Amino acid sequence: MTQAQMRPAHELRADNVTLNYGGRDIVSNVSFAIPDGKITVIVGANACGKSTLLRGLSRLLRPASGHVMLDGRDIHPLPSKEVAQVVGILPQSPIAPEGITVRDLVARGRYPHQGWFQQWSSADDVAVERALHTTDTAELASRRLEELSGGQRQRVWIAMALSQDPDILLLDEPTTFLDVRHQLDALDVLADLNSERGTTIVMVLHELNLAARYADHMVLMREGQILAEGTPTEVVTADRMREAFGLESQIIADPVSHSPMVIPVGRA
């Protein structure tokens, strides 16, 4: 039996969830379930509620109404360490202590696996080294985080999330600050994590064509609601692009992945 097959199945879902800031609803009465063992990508126009929904799913933002459920239990009353053993989160603007080195930051991803009777082990060392090499950050390990470029820092944060080795990994704009090559590298790492280890991946992406290329399941949002969800072929249509983005477009097959590819019409 492969490691992916051995991973336990988990159910993460939103039940009639409303999320707000300062009394203003950003996400309104949303219900959906994350497909276990798949890559789900949440897309939509700016300020449509994508990142807010991800924060709600990750327990960083408590719903004003409704519930986020993990394996049939409301996620908010659960102990933080118990949740972190199943769900990992890379937020949009993570914060690190001043002066921390790359290796020390990545090692913090192992915190959920520590305990009174289970301290740092060789397995933790292996997980950290694997995360550093997977993200091409091993040679940065001794450097302080603030010395790095934005793209390098983003890869280090992804390494920390990988070292946690969660069964469900939530990422908000993981390709931020990355050039085209490293965007593809980062998404390939996540795709490999999904296919080889069975990790459920949920991420917010702005780039529609990358989202369609890597997603098994897409969630398209508009004004705090889910406009459509399904396979990329089901979600990425000219009508939906017009409705969600006000964008006139043609949809063709990506010549590399054969996934739907959005070609904006613009003034042409």
Image: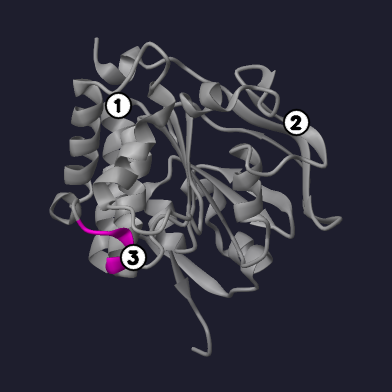
Provide the residue designation for mark 2: 67
Which-is-in-front pick, marks 1 and 3?
3
Q: In screen coordinates, is 50 left or right of 156?
A: right
Provide the residue designation for mark 1: 197
The CA distance from mark 3 to mark 2 is 37 Å
Instruction: Name the N-terminal-most of marks 3 and 2.
Output: 2
Residue 30 position in % (x across, y down)? 74, 41
Provide the residue designation for mark 3: 146
Residue 113 position in % (x across, y down)? 39, 22
Q: Name the residue: 24% across, 36% down.
A: 128
Residue 142 position in % (x across, y down)? 18, 53
> In what element is the residue under mark 1?
helix
Q: In screen coordinates, is 13 left or right of 198?
A: right
| Image quadrant occupied by the N terminus | top left
Instruction: Name the N-terminal-most of marks 2 and 1.
Output: 2
In terms of secondary structure, what is the magenta stretch mainly?
Answer: helix
Q: How many numbered dots are placed on residues in this image? A: 3
The CA distance from mark 1 to mark 3 is 31 Å
Q: Name the residue: 62% across, 38% down.
A: 57
Q: Which residues are magenta?
A: 143-147
